[in-house]
Image (cartoon, rainbow, N blue to C red):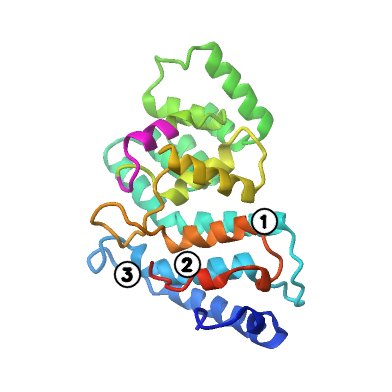
Amino acid sequence: SIANSSDSSLSSEGPYSALCSALDEYSSESADNSVSDDEMSDPEVPKVVPRAFSLLSTLYGREENGETNVCNERRAEGVKIWLRSAASNDMIASIKSSKNRGKLLQAIYDALSGGNIAKASSLAIENGHLRLATLITCNDLQTRLDMLEQMEMTGQAPSLPSELRRIYALLGGDLREEEGISQASPTFPATLDWRRRLILRIMFSSDDASLPAVLQEVEGDIERRVFPQPNPRHHTSGPSQDDCILYQMLQVWASNSGPTSPSQAPLSLLINPLT
């Protein structure tokens, strides 16, 4: 098992390559074994272990040619892809709920919070918000700065629907409203799950900090109660003393500035994948 593997054994060519292959295969097979809502109220709970394995492979895996020196930027892109996948169940459920309640602008926001720009733009077009769809697809730093300037000039546009104002704030790189919501209701499901909030922080922040730097800043945001508590999803009886294993893995990687070899990563800290 991973918990009983030493760093030295992982760093040798054969065992480590075999481990990565096993993790990839297990993650792929587990992803196909979905659990219905009738069998499990939160479909994310049975996915904790396969998500942990796929994240481990993303953070510490090697190139196909065996190269271990993978730059932080490429690791970060892999983490973004992993985050969108890990948040997809929540995003789909939120969009469905918003549509059923006739909250079409909220559905667009739900897609953005899952990191799915194409889905958010498609929903905007379907509901006649063509200018909004254009703004969503122009998600670059200059567009964010222009949007933020417009929002400040109009005094946060108090006449706008709250959902649209929230979307515009995101597109302008202003996360203060998200922070206020987290401060009022710091735990899921009253607020977004930490994975979706991390997506918003990465995709819509007005700065261009590296992913390890963002993850380190998140620790301070949690202490200030402006970022959701990364509680394990299986823990439903109040705040947990332990953070979600997936969040812990990201923070271990960030604290090592994106280690390029498994021997640099204290994997012994991640003993129980169900924590």
Label 3 amino acid? Answer: Val
Kind of residue indicated by mark 2 = Arg
Q: Residue at x 39, y 40 (%)?
A: 107
For the residue labelled by badge 3, is the local secondary structure a helix, a strand or a loop? loop
The residue located at (53%, 18%) in the rendering is 151
Residues rendered magenta in the picture: 179-189
Category of crowding for the residue at label 3, using alpha-carbon neighbours closer than 10 angstroms: few (below 14), some (14–19), many (at least 20): some
Q: Which residue is identified by label 1?
A: 257
Query: Alpha-carbon distance for marks 3 and 1?
Result: 36 Å
Give x and y (percent) for residue 10. Answer: 64, 81
In the displayed structure, does residue 176 sit left or right of residue 185?
A: right
Residue denoted by label 3: 35
Which tag, 3 or 2, sits closer to the chain's start? 3
Instruction: Give the SS element for disc 2.
Output: helix
Residue 161 highlighted magenta (yes or no): no
Q: Position of residue 158 (x, y in %)?
A: 41, 15
Q: Is residue 161 above or below residue 207?
A: above
* Amino acid under disc 1: Ser
Measuring from the top left, give residue 205's x and y in whole percent: 58, 36
